[in-house]
């Protein structure tokens, strides 16, 4: 998968690296702002099943 992605991106190596870094940053931003808050409503971290 990574080899195909590397071959699809245009330009010299430094441009490809910049594009991949931008892509990683965009994926992380989507996870932080949309995916994790959506999943958080289904996972209650304050509820515990361990009793003392």
Image (cartoon, helix red, strand yellow):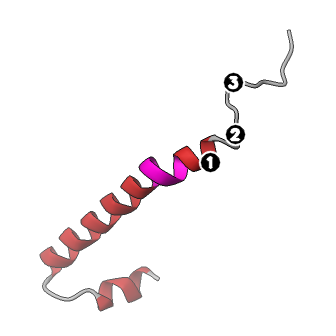
Q: Quadrant of the C terminus?
A: top right
The percent coordinates of residue 34 (x first, y second) are 48, 53
Nearest the eye: 5 or 41? 41
Residue found at x 43% / y 49% = 33
Above or below 24: residue 33: above
Q: Secondary structure at mark 3?
A: loop
Q: Secondary structure at mark 1?
A: helix
Q: Residues within 10 Å of mark 2 (few under 14, many from 20)?
A: few
Give whichever of discs 1 and 3 has the lower sequence position.
1
The percent coordinates of residue 22 (x first, y second) are 25, 65
- The stretch in magenta equals 31-36
Q: Which mark is residue 46?
A: 3
Residue found at x 42% / y 57% = 30
The percent coordinates of residue 49 (x first, y second) are 84, 25
Q: In this figure, which residue is indicated by the disc labeled 2?
A: 43
Q: Is residue 23 left or right of 48 when viewed as pictured?
A: left
Q: Is residue 40 left or right of 22 when viewed as pictured?
A: right
Rounded to the nearest whole Å, what is the CA distance between mark 3 and mark 2? 9 Å
Q: Which mark is residue 39?
A: 1
Rounded to the nearest whole Å, what is the CA distance between mark 1 and mark 3? 14 Å
Above or below 41: residue 15: below
- Whether residues under marks 1 and 2 lie with C-beta atoms below 8 angstroms apart, the answer is yes
């Amino acid at each position: 998968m990574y080899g195909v992605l590397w071959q699809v991106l245009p330009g010299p190596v430094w441009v490809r690296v910049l594009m991949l870094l931008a892509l990683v940053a965009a994926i992380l931003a989507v996870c932080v702002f949309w995916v994790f808050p959506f999943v958080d409503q289904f996972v209650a971290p304050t509820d515990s099943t361990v009793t003392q």
